[in-house]
Image (spheres, rainbow, N blue to C red):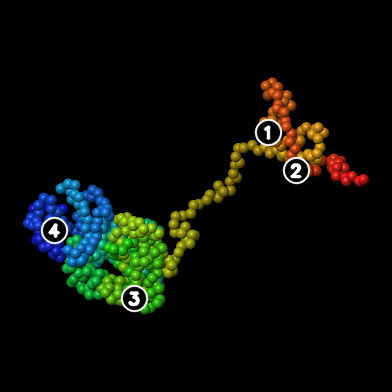
């Protein structure tokens, strides 16, 4: 929305092409100056955003209000349209394809980053690599220690670029997440800073971002198709990056391992890699290792979208041109992340990306770099004892406290009673009248209450009172126990009783002789 007092010549040209900064949308048949009810779209500020934004609310337009169709009125081209109702005339709305990330926001972030990284001393540096055509900064962030522990080993170098296309703002969020992790005190970042030097260019096309272009520079050039024809007049930013990478590649003290160009994809979902194909089998095997590690680290990585080719139409891209001028050990990739969202495995639900999700992609890139160097042996994997030595000091144990005799708890010890189970040896045919009643002969069917009541009556103790002594006991019903295996306690039975028992058994089972 904008001022209706002035009209623009661009808005009068029906179907006019080019960079239009302000356009009036009129109903069919109307012409002249904009009137009340007409829409004025103003894009005369950087990347659809201002240096200062008072964000009240943001939301995605529901799917039922977005339409994508092939239009006969537009020569068979596809048309994206959406419906939206304005509540108040004075309201201002910003419509964007992805979360905005302006040139001003980047400069603010880098200023804050510079202050946060003050504790890193010589491990962090921000410098001006080159100026753009309109004299805007091309910042270069260097993270890593230049001190070599082993003079024979080369220092590994990783170069990362973002925002070659101004309209692909998610790439800036990915780069921000990567930078925030690299300057942190996290163990992953600390280990990488000791062994690897990162060269990060957060915004390759500052003029295009400031002007609100989608793919081009201020001169209308697509930087990701101009690497093979770059010159210092029309493409000063990529010319400066090429010269920097060539210097690093020729330096015997460094080994350039990665060049990663971060982009955002407008149609495919998830994150994925575009790589190169080589006739050298060993170089190709080294080249596909990093994408495989990404697939294990990223939840949103889509291996189906990953592609390795030598397309002649892509000769002007960074990954295709740089792999032809750098040494064979340099892996050049294009890292793509969707503008829309990603689909979890085994599901058809699309989860839209947020700013935090994009920054998480940057952090995952850092984790994958560490995993790559550990798998290739460039960074040793610390064992448990080494981690303790590098980390905090182990907890000290006082020897005097260990040798001191512990005091037993203030509890009294008592001997546990030893109970014997005495089994009476008798024939099941013997009458109960011949047996003396005792607890050995009680029926197993008697209840605990019946046994307790009998004991109370037999004791006659005054402490239980007359109520318990005079209480009649219910008659006991004796039931023959089922045959079971008996265990004889020879300590309680004399030999004569055993002999008498055996004789009694012999008499019962002695056959009658007639």
The mark nearer the N terminus, 1 or 3, is: 3
Position in image of residue 155 (x %, y %): 37, 69
Position in image of residue 6 (x %, y %): 8, 55
Whether label 3 touches label 2, CB < 8 Å: no
Taking the spot 70% from the left edge, 27% from the top edge, the residue there is 474
User: Can you tell which of label 4 and label 2 is closer to the viewer?
Assistant: 2
Q: What residue does disc 1 label? A: 447
Q: Distance between the residues labelled 1 and 4?
A: 99 Å
The mark nearer the N terminus, 4 or 2, is: 4
Q: How far apart are marks 1 and 3 (CA)?
A: 94 Å
User: Can you tell which of label 2 and label 1 is closer to the viewer?
Assistant: 2
* Secondary element at image label 1: loop
Q: What residue does disc 2 label? A: 483
Q: Compared with residue 274, is residue 474 higher up or lower down, i.e. above or below? A: above
The mark nearer the N terminus, 4 or 3, is: 4
User: Can you tell which of label 1 and label 4 is closer to the viewer?
Assistant: 1
Q: Which residue lies furthest to the left in this view?
A: 32
* 228 relative position to 8: left or right: right
Q: Compared with residue 17, is residue 89 higher up or lower down, i.e. above or below? A: above
Q: What residue does disc 4 label? A: 23
* Secondary element at image label 3: loop
Taking the spot 17% from the left edge, 63% from the top edge, the residue there is 73
Label 1 Cα crowd, 10 Å radius (few <14 / some 14-19 / many 20+): few
Q: What residue does disc 3 label? A: 327
The mark nearer the N terminus, 1 or 4, is: 4
Residue 463 in view of the camera: no
Q: How far apart are marks 4 and 2 (CA)?
A: 106 Å
Residue 45 in view of the camera: yes
């Amino acid at each position: 929305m904008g001022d209706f007092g002035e009209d623009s010549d661009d808005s009068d040209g029906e179907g006019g092409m080019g960079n239009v900064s302000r356009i009036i949308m009129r109903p069919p048949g109307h012409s002249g100056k904009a009137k009340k009810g007409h829409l004025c779209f103003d894009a005369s500020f950087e990347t659809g955003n201002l240096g200062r934004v008072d964000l009240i609310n943001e939301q995605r337009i529901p799917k039922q209000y977005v339409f994508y169709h092939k239009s006969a009125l537009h020569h068979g081209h596809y048309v994206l349209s959406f419906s939206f109702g304005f509540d108040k005339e004075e309201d201002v709305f910003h419509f964007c394809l992805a979360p905005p990330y302006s040139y001003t926001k980047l400069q603010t972030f880098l200023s804050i980053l510079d202050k946060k990284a003050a504790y890193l001393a010589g491990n962090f540096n921000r410098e001006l690599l080159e100026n753009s055509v309109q004299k805007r900064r091309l910042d270069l962030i260097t993270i890593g220690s230049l001190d070599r522990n082993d003079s024979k080993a080369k220092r590994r170098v990783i170069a990362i670029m973002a925002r070659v296309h101004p309209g692909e703002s998610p790439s800036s969020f990915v780069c921000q997440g990567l930078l925030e992790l690299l300057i942190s005190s996290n163990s992953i970042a600390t280990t990488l800073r000791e062994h690897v030097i990162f060269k990060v260019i957060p915004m390759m096309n500052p003029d295009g971002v400031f002007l609100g272009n989608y793919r081009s520079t201020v001169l209308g050039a697509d930087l990701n198709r101009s690497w093979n024809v770059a010159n210092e007049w029309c493409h000063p930013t990529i010319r400066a990056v090429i010269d920097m990478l060539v210097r690093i590649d020729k330096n015997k003290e460094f080994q350039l391992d990665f060049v990663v160009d971060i982009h955002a994809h407008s149609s495919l979902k998830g994150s994925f890699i575009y790589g190169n194909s080589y006739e050298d089998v060993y170089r190709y095997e080294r080249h596909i290792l990093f994408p495989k590690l990404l697939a294990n680290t990223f939840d949103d990585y889509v291996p189906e979208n990953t592609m390795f080719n030598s397309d002649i139409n892509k000769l002007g891209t960074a990954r295709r041109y740089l792999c032809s001028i750098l040494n064979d050990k340099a892996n050049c990739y294009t890292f793509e992340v969707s503008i829309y969202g990603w689909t979890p495995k085994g599901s058809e639900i699309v989860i839209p990306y947020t700013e935090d999700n994009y920054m998480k992609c940057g952090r995952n890139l850092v984790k994958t770099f560490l995993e790559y160097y550990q798998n290739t042996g460039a960074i040793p994997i610390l064992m448990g004892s080494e981690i303790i030595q590098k980390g905090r000091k182990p907890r000290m144990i006082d020897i005097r406290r260990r040798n001191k005799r512990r005091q037993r708890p203030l509890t009294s010890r008592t001997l546990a009673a030893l109970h014997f189970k005495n089994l009476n040896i008798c024939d099941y045919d013997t009458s109960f009248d011949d047996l003396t009643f005792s607890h050995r002969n009680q029926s197993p069917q008697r209840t605990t209450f019946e046994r307790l009541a009998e004991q109370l009556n037999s004791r006659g103790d005054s402490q239980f009172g007359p109520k318990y002594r005079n209480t009649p006991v219910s008659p006991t019903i004796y039931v023959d126990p089922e045959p079971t295996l008996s265990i004889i306690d020879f300590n309680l039975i004399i030999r004569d009783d055993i002999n008498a028992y055996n004789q009694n058994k012999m008499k019962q089972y002695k056959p009658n002789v007639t």
